[in-house]
């Protein structure tokens, strides 16, 4: 068994990365696939969304126990200890049920400390004469090794990337089989898309990473402006030497996608968490994601 690694990334903020990551993770897990979410964002939104009703308490616990992705970075690269990613996994982290059974969904939580940790690490290693590139390579190598151990335990690993770009993001993207780029089809977001497919993917290609990102149109409101931009994005994806491909599924702007675990109460069903036809849309996307995986 070797897990497929999927990253959800876009330098632009608020485009639906976390919503896409957690809804896909739950849909995969609902099919009985052993699924892991790796939260790389200092906002820890994916952690809270996976934990669900008592998310605050679970996250507080993980932070207190030094059991977040931030601690993995600190211990390996500053304290010089060998701690594998798998030691940071919270098993059965989700409170959602499907078909009467809990989801087989695990989580490596993030922490608000991650931002400070990444900065400290850059100072610490540059002090020792390491270049930014050397740091990137070191983290990248370690992530790849740790991913290889994790891959043996899971069917699917989904990584929720932060907006902007971080030391961890590029390393995770380089280790991914599929990169999903949620994008709102509007003027501002397509500027962000150019930045991502141009800048970020270019630097990955320089490191010999061949993965072509797949754009997912999100928060689509059907306005004439968004229709025009969505069509333009589809044309760009169909062009020769396109820098990205596109999912046919479009995620509409709907309250059902803006899930609130606190209001849902404990142990919701997956149908309650993604109400109405929201779940059907997520399953449509799931089918396309599965088809896109190598
Ligand atoms: N399809 C949708 N319809 C309505 N609301 C949505 C939809 N998708 C996401 N939202 C809401 O929009 C906000 C941003 O979504 P989300 O957190 O998934 O984006 P993000 O790209 O992860 O943001 P960030 O860059 O801050 O990490 C959230 O409040 C979320 O609940
Ligand atoms: Mg997010």
Image: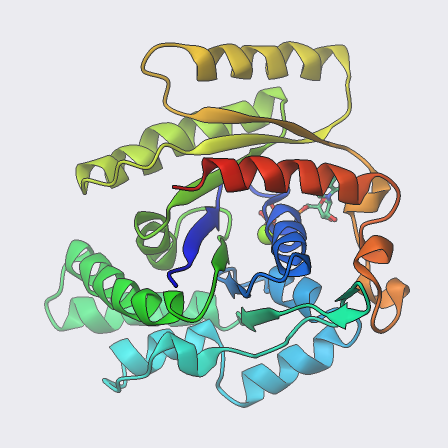
Give the position of the N terminus as an image quadrant: bottom left
**What is the x, y in percent for residue 27?**
67, 53
Rendered location of residue 293, percent (x, y): 44, 41
Vertical side of 207 occupied by 112: above or below: below
Residue 136 in the image, given as x and y percentages of width and height: 23, 58
Q: Quadrant of residue 151?
A: bottom left
Query: How many numbered marks appear?
Result: 0
Q: Residue at x 33, y 72 (%)?
A: 149
The structure residue drawn at horizontal position 61% and vertical position 14%, both measured from the top left corner, is: 229
Q: Looking at the picture, does residue 184 appear above or below residue 235?
A: below
- Left or right: 3 in relation to 131: right
- Residue 92 located left or right of residue 167: right
Residue that lies at the very extreme toward the bottom in this rendered image? 65
Q: Quadrant of the C terminus?
A: top left
- Residue 88 visible, this orientation: yes
> Who's the residue at 83% across and 62% down the image?
269
Q: Position of residue 67 (x, y in %)?
A: 49, 83
**Horizontal placement of 238 versus 232: left or right?**
left
Decide if residue 12 is in sight here.
no
| Residue sitting nearer the eye, 282 or 83 | 282
Between 253 and 135, which is closer to the camera in this rendering? 253
Q: Nearer the viewer, residue 84 or 110?
A: 84
Residue 62 against residue 245 in the figure, above or below: below
Name which quarter of the figure residue 141 lies in. bottom left
Task: Check the image and tell me how it is coloured.
Answer: rainbow
- Kindly identify the residue that appears in the image at 47 percent across and 32 percent down: 214
């Amino acid at each position: 068994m070797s897990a497929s690694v999927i990253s959800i990334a876009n330098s632009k903020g608020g485009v639906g990365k976390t919503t896409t990551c957690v809804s896909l993770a739950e849909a995969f897990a609902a099919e009985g696939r052993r699924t892991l979410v790796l939260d790389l964002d200092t906002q820890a939104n994916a952690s809270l969304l996976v934990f669900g009703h008592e998310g605050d308490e679970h996250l507080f616990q993980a932070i207190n126990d030094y059991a977040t992705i931030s601690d993995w970075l600190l211990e390996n690269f500053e304290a010089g200890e060998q701690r594998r990613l798998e030691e940071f996994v919270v098993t059965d982290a989700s409170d959602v049920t499907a078909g009467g059974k809990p989801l087989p969904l695990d989580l490596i939580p993030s922490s608000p400390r991650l931002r400070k940790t990444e900065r400290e690490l850059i100072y610490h290693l540059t002090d020792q004469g390491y270049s930014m590139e050397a740091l990137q390579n070191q983290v990248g190598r370690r992530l790849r090794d740790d991913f290889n151990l994790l891959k043996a335990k899971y069917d699917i690993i989904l990584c929720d990337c932060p907006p902007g770009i971080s030391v961890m993001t590029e390393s995770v993207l380089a280790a991914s089989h599929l990169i999903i780029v949620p994008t709102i089809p509007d003027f501002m977001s397509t500027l962000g898309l150019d930045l991502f497919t141009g800048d970020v993917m270019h630097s990955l290609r320089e490191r010999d990473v061949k993965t072509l990102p797949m754009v997912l149109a999100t928060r689509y409101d059907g306005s004439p402006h968004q229709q025009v931009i969505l069509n333009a994005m589809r044309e760009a994806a169909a062009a020769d030497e396109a820098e990205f491909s596109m999912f046919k599924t479009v995620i509409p702007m709907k309250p059902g996608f803006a899930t609130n675990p606190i209001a849902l109460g404990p142990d919701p069903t997956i149908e309650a968490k993604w109400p109405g036809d929201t779940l059907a849309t997520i399953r449509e996307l799931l089918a396309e994601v599965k088809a896109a995986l190598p």
